[in-house]
Image: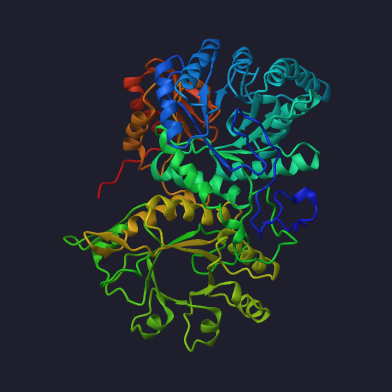
Amino acid sequence: MSNQSPSLSNTLNRYCESLTQYKRRFSRVVHIGDVPLGGHYPIRVQSMTTVDTMDTKGSVEQSIRMIEAGCEYVRITAPSLKEAQNLENIKNELRARGYKTPLVADIHFTPNAAEVAARIVEKVRVNPGNYADKKKFQLIDYSDAAYEQELERIRLAFSPLVKICKEYGTAMRIGTNHGSLRDRIMSRYGDTPLGMVESALEFVRICEDLQYQNIVISMKSSNTQVMVEAYRLLVNKLEAGNHGAYPLHLGVTEAGEAEDGRIKSAVGIGTLLEDGLGDTVRVSLTEDPEFEIPVAKKLIERYSQRAEHKPIKPVTVLPLNPFEYNRRNTKEVRNFGGSNVPRVIADLSKTNKPIAYHDLKEIGLHYFELTDKWNSTDLSCDYIYSGKEEIQFMLPNGTREILDYESWQKSKEKKNKFPLYSNSGEYFDASEKSEELNLVKITYKDLTELFYNQIKKDNTAVLVLATQNDHAMAALRRIFFYLMENGVDNPAVILREFQEKDEENFILKAATDCGGLLVDGLGDGILLIDSSELTNNGHTVQRQPSMVNRTAFGILQAARTRMTKTEYISCPSCGRTLFDLQETTAMIRKRTDHLKGIKIGIMGCIVNGPGEMADADFGYVGVGKDKIALYKGKEVVKRSVPAENALDELIELIKENGMWSEPEYL
């Protein structure tokens, strides 16, 4: 980890007003039809239609479903002039039916389409990476003079749109995407958060020169670390450069589907919301857009009363670089910390009966009685927290048990079993300790000078960080900072406990609180505890541990700290999509979801092709009706593959690159 200790009082390192007191960033108000954005207005929810824009009736009906689900801005793709012109028909029909929700035109390569749309809808979205530009994946050593010539070319192409927006009162989102940075930006800044920010600022400066400030900005990426760093750096640069405090549109590009898509969205969006950043949210799921709205609303609703949380001591010196990922330096204790991936501790302490073999199937450990053998999966936990009740059979190799201290002390066989102490006092007063690994639960109250001096000398102690503060992520981050400030390099596990009857709420809250720490390199393990009590036929039951276990692994993967399964970078369908994206994603997942750690991009059209899946290992991209292009990284290797053969061809491509393995069947 970097030894830099940047001061928060120095604007060079600041990206939010406080890291401990929740306060939403105050941005300028941008007028978008009758629904203003920024300032003291609520954080707005938006989504994007998936119907062909030329299908007026279908677009209107889908827009209405989105609006009735709570969508406050409806975005519609306008990839060419004809779609831009048809926005007027869609708008007129919506208004005739009594719907006044502002419309947003999504523009990519075609300035003339943007200029038409800006006269019709309330807002246009342009991408600096491909507005009047084409990406050729070429690195060019630009001289300063040549660079300025390119900027002037962009200015000439972009200025007409700005002038139209001023004239018609149309708002604009300048939306940088990590995967579609121009070759010129890549050549000077690289594939970095700084490159993303500078790409947007070039367009912001043109707007400001033309006295146009009705601007919203986004920094989207499918990589949550890059996304978080880019938004932070953007806020920092806007302030340092005396630009306007423009509102922020938050979104993770191509988050995916189901649990994975929700976890990834919460890790990226939730991390920024925690620090008060963000004025509008779009959750990008490979599902119908009306299903995105409730997820976005749940992410936002968490902060309606957040300002009333218990006080947390302010941070004056930041012991990490908020714009660059570096993992906290720790000693290695057993397989925690050091260079080890973060560990997953599965909670089985809430089981109301003795733990049996079949209970472990829920956490990725399958026992076959006939052969007396175990089979582990990629989602097999590293440790099982059994609490007070000791497991009465031998666990498979590699898996270890954690018991509450008193139960551990009473155990007759302590091999492969380790104690969890309820606080630092119990640990230091303990008459017996493990010679290999001791887990010590701590809260803010445990942090004393005596604690720091004793614990950092202990090469067997792993800390388990917990808090009851409503502003949990910030409270836990503050504990991490205390440890770093006082030279404590013991590994630390993130503990979060929830009582959520709603499963989706559990997933979103866990992913936000833990992911917000992990993307900053904080955390050597994760322990999620589900304390909810559900009712089934009048009986109180516990939720199955499998969901909690999947969530823990999903958070680590989404935060890019431990890759355990295939990752699918799939765009939400839109009017440009050339095949049934949900069905195709499910089909590809069925054949490839055993490929540990591989990233596959599944893009509905060439607009979202090589750009949006920037860090995918392989890509499956629609290029025409029933035609697919296959990518290796950013390079297209097979063009116009018939759709019926494309999945087999993709698998062959994976095999050719030595990344295929046959699935194991349990």
Q: Residue 102's x, y, as percent?
A: 55, 27
Q: Depth check: 577 or 172 in front?
A: 172
Quadrant hosting residue 580: top left
Q: Depth check: 93 or 415 in front?
A: 93
Quadrant hosting residue 119: top right
Q: Residue extending furthest left?
A: 370
When the figure is inspected, residue 160 is found, relative to residue 307, above or below; the finding is above
**In the image, 26: left or right of 658?**
right
Quadrant hosting residue 486: bottom right
The quadrant of the rendering that contains the N terminus is bottom right
Residue displayed at 48% across by 80% down: 435
Q: Depth check: 645 or 230 in front?
A: 230
**In the image, 440: left or right of 452?**
left
Residue displayed at 44% across by 38% down: 292
When the figure is inspected, residue 13 is found, relative to residue 93, above or below; the finding is below
When the figure is inspected, residue 656 is found, relative to residue 505, above or below; the finding is above
Q: Residue 100's x, y, as percent?
A: 52, 26
Tell how many labels. 0
Q: Residue extending furthest right?
A: 145
**In the image, 658: left or right of 126?**
left
Can residue 95 be seen here? The reply is: yes
Q: Residue 254's x, y, as percent?
A: 49, 35
When the figure is inspected, residue 403 is found, relative to residue 68, above or below; the finding is below
Can residue 256 be seen here? The reply is: no
Q: Residue 262's x, y, as percent?
A: 45, 44
Chosen colour scheme: rainbow
